[in-house]
Image (cartoon, coloured by chain):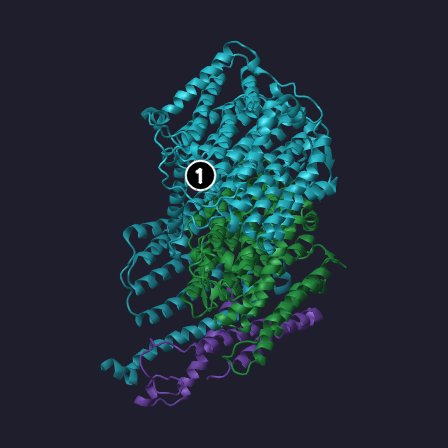
Amino acid sequence: MELDFQTSVDYFWALLPEIVLSLWAMGVLLADVFQKGSRSEASRPAIAWLALAGIAAAAVANVWLMTVTGTGGMIAVDGFRIFANFILLLAAALAILVSMGYLDRHAMNRGEFYVLLMFAVVGMMILASAQDLILLFVGLELMSVAIYVLVGFNRRDPRSGEAALKYFLLGAFASAFLLYGIALVFGATGTTDLALLAETIGTGVQDAPLLLMMGVGLLAVGFAFKVAAMPFHVWTPDAYDGAPTPITALMATGVKAAAFAALLRVFAVSFGGLHETWVVAFWWLAALTMIGANLVALTQGSVKRMLAYSSIAHAGYVLVAVVAANAVGAAAFLFYLLVYTLMTAGAFGIVIANARGDRERVSLEDYAGLGWQQPVMAAAFAIFLLSLAGFPLTGGFIGKLYILRAALAADQVPLAVILVMASLISYFYYLRVVIVMYMRPAPAADTHAGLTASRPLQVAVGVAAIGVILLFFAPAMVLDAAQGSVAGLFIAQEALFGLSRGP
Amino acid sequence: MIESYLPILILLAISVVNAVVILGLTYLVSPYRPTSVKSAPYESGMPGLGGTRDRFSVKFYVVAILFIVFDVETVFLVPWAVAMRDLGWEGFAAAMIFIFILTVGLIYEWKKGALEWD
Amino acid sequence: MLLTLAVIIGIPFLIGGLALVIPRPWNGWLALLAPATVIALGLPLWMEVGGGGEILVPLSWFPDLGLTADLFVNRLGAFFVMLIGIIGLGIVQYSRYYLKEDATGWFWFLLLSFMGSMLGIVLADSLLLLFVFWELTTITSFLLIGIDFGKEEGRKGALQAFLVTGVGGLALLVGIVLLGQLAGTYNLTELYAMSGEIVADPRHTIPLILIFLGAFTKSAQFPFHFWLPGAMAAPAPISAYLHSATMVKAGVFLLGRMFPIFSEAAIWLPTLATIGLITFLVAGWNAVKSSDLKQLLAHSTVAYLGVLTALYGFYARVGLEGELVNILNHALYKSSLFLLIGWMEKAMGSRDLAILEKERWIGREKLGATLIGIGAFAMIGMPFLLGFMAKDTFFYAVAEGPIEGLTLALVITVLASTLAVIYALKLWAGVFFGSEEPPTGRGYPRNKISIWLLVVPALLLLPQVVGGVIPAWYLGQVVEPGTTWQGVAFWQYLDVKLVITLAMLVAGYFGYRHWRAIAATPFLSKLPSVQRGGEGLVSGTLAHASSLSRMLQLGGHPRYGSIILLVAIAVVIGGVAFSGRTLFDHGLVWGPNPEFAWFPALVVAIAAVFTVTLRKRIPKAVMMAVVGYGMAVFYVFFRAPDLALTQLLVETVSVILLLLIFRRMPELGDDIRSVRRRVVHGVVAVVVGLTMGALAWAAGSYHVAERAGYEQIRLALPIAEGRNVVNVILVDFRGMDTLGEIFVLGIAAFGAYALFRGRRHRPAGPEAEEVKR
């Protein structure tokens, strides 16, 4: 199908996955309230499965979207969007799967949880595919507002409330910066359409008014906040730590991936002509993030918090791909987001599973001897941790290799060195968990007996683990798709993201 | 130059007069015989209990949010109704989608019990 | 051929996996099958390529990314396959009897996976595939070293080994990718073909240095030599396999793989010769100091790895044969010595020389003494042992090496070899002839010790003797099948070199007699330790990390907010500074009435300061109103009377509402923030405000988006028949809007009035009663 966005009907087709998901979410909302006898009753498991079916339906619509081409609208219809959508839907599906047992254990099984999650995903998808700064902002807010609520969803836990408040207050800063940035960009160019912006700006930093660059800078600040790049990450550890763990997983994967997708689209497509300037900013962000986050992660005693810092560190690695600003970098970017989503969601899944009742066992000592008493769980965790560290036999290795190559191809040697040094530091804290799991005896023979890994969680962790391994042994499928996806994105900046393939 | 501001003045006057008339009429028409009971602070038909710095029940906020939702709906729908013919079916569909979403919200609140006080 | 190679690499993994599920002792038997298969398949391979042939097996992985899984066998690779297989067979057999019930499925899995990874390294053609296996050996060896997970020492050593080799691994990765970037391929065979071009390109130095780093860390070269002795907590067979025969040789192997590409590089010879010889000397000195015999062996291993590294520098002179002889020599005697130390621990109850030398063990353990003696003599390089040929080759390479007159290298070699004599004698004579007194019989363990603990080392030492007795035929078969070893015969020359050799032996003997005194020499014992430096680096990093996290993770959102705001501002200011341009490149537009505008600006600024600093609510509200009114004046200057009007009304109403509410609220408490923090917050606020204000000011000077305005001006007369566009907009274009706004404001104003009036009547209510009470 060919869409030219002359009529509103075109928007209906272009937004089909989002529309399907929104309608489905409303349906889930109603189904939830209608199936309950009394208001305080917990939701039925079917609600969660219904939500999952909605994600699947959106994925089907997304598959259909592959047959559609369209230009000129406020929403992009391209491979990049479709690939990003799949990542986001995958993150959502994993989050729903790991939520199922978790919500029951923490006595907060409410249908609204899943509904908000789905709306958040709609926001993410819009964010990742907006072709207009205003729509991008709408997507961002749709996502953020739902996530603010989800972070504070555990009303009994004061830390959850604290996390929500901090995230909200600081998130408001980020939104303000983003909005101010959009305003300045609009002020300097007279448009908010990404394609028109690219045309207006042209290629040449010399001609660009400084006001435009200030707008670009503020946009970068807003995005840096959402992807939690240092030093705009300050909210992350507290928010990730306090939020219900499935939401932490979603924030670390979906939210971050969506913000990154939007970042790449805006900066590569619209501001591609100015890349000499913003690459400098992202260079520093990437370097700071990689060094700082990894150093701080070293000192964490809580595994959940360590994973929070690890997700910050990984934002730094992805930023390296952005800085590389070449075709390899763009494909590496998508590939890495996919691997990252799998391994991070999986790791948080294990954190959820290593709990008894409503007490999460997140300190390092709680993992002692897990390798012998819960071999499958520990093996899965080891896979995720090794993948996060970038070891061979895991997709994390291919991802990091890909980014490294992109950076070196772009002659960003210092950044590549920082990436490697940062990875090295990260070995220490990832491997520390592995060591504790396998080399430190458990306090008692039944310390880890009867851990509460629900069946859906097992499925999620299993899928993630297999995915991480598969991405090592057969990366071709996904890499091809990733390269194909970015091919359509940068037509305007062919020189920048010179679309040649291979080394 | 000055006369061109006349329409604004007229507009201002209309709204001021409007407000004055509404409040003035009640002042003129209603008898004024205050008793201690009548002058008591009005609190939903109940005698006031305690100071004004009390915490309010969260239910008030739910009602307030409900009000804002429908207030916004009105703000959107009135101009839409005025321009409906020009907007055509496309506009109609857009408004219907908007109303549909709000309706879903209303049904949810209804079933959730937000419309009941207890 | 693909099948053969795949089986060689795959079978250890496969059997390792099976060993996890098959119970003891069957998994031990099964484990023997893995190295046996490797040998059986490796032998024909060696016959085929040993003479110089090459086999390349293309295997697709992801060619677009340059990721291929091509396999490649040449002489060096096939030699290592055989080495890994033969030593591996001995180790597996030894482990079955040494570890007994400790040889769990997990152990076999790790050991055989390690073996498979090593085979992967030596058979990979793609450097990326090589790296994958390289890292696998790092992980599996890490787990193997720390397998005795009860011991704190084991964990620490494992971690240290892991970190050092991990650093090297990452350096290697970057080096490989850079090399691939430079050459356009990751495949060794293709790289060999273009070695001339690569070396001609000056950019080859950085990847080469990084690859050196990878090799040096893995092979424990100076200054990374400290991890290997630290990793000695592992059981004897693991140490024997990992730290003598295979893993540490991976670094040397990598140098061998790189040789055809980089041998002409300017830094090749100096780097390898320097690092190798320094390692030889430093590690030799450490071995002399060691009392723990296993530590001694570990240091001596490092020393020999230095020899092997240096030899690659002098490679051109002695060729691959010289290198192979040395690798073989070391693998054979060092693995058997490690295994014998394991036997010694079981049979003699200790491996500490300070304890062992108290007894004359020679009377009781003749077989063990003989075997250890052979090993120690091979270490010294005594005639009629393979060690002699090896040492001879090395001396030849150094003395007659490509750098003429490199006396220093020769001096170091002689010195380090003398040290080798000392520690070899410690190991043998020290243990077995230690004491003059008759045996006491104290601490003699009566354990039943399997004879295999001696048989396996004996079998591994056998080639040492055979190679020493009939070197020409034997070495011919070993380093190049079907030929006779010509060798190099340094010893043939009956000149000063022979004298040096004899002097070395004599000096070594005297050194052995007084090794404690030498080790305690104040000057020498105070030498700086690299290990302490490394540990200091790690603990320093950790300390910095925790202070960094304390700084960033204090928890209060005011601090978080300040960080975010300040950095954002820094981005803006930095951006301006970086661009070297002024923000006001469209001129400094200070509104349409610049001569008056400074006044409201001043008022707004002063009022804003008061809003923040005053400590009472009502004055705060009033000051806020002043700010708002000041803004309204600005709007007037900017010819936006409707905005000004709205602003005035909103400001008025909100001030009234605020005042009414504040009257009923308690006063603000004292500011609990410290002065310092208040100052910081103040600075943040001022900086952010100024920057954002400047941006807004700059934005005001741009006139890009006026389309909507022009449209309204164009339409004002024809449609609304008004000449004052502002009025037309207010009353016609946005008439309903304006009416609504005013209406709402009007009602709000009356509401405020009602609030005022309500206060007058308050005393009548029951609330007043409460107030009275």
Amino acid type of the residue tagged 1 in the rendering: Gly
- Badge 1: few (under 14), some or many (20 or more) residues near its Cα, within 10 Å? many
Given residues A57 and C575, the one toward you in this image is: A57
Which chain, by letter, is green? Answer: A
Q: Position of residue A460 (x, y in %)?
A: 59, 62
As drawn, the chain in cyan is: C
Front one among C648 and A98: A98
Secondary-structure class at tag 1: helix
Taking the view exactly as shown, the residue that stands out farthest to the top is: C495
Please name the residue shown 34% across and 58% down the image: C611
Q: Tell me, yes or no, if residue A454 can be seen here.
A: yes
The reply, left or right, for residue B71 in relation to residue C60 is: left
The quarter of the picture where residue C258 lies is top right
Task: Give coordinates of residue C289: x percent, y percent.
Answer: 39, 30
From the viewer's side, name the closer residue of C78 and C19: C19
Front-lying residue, C106 or A306: C106
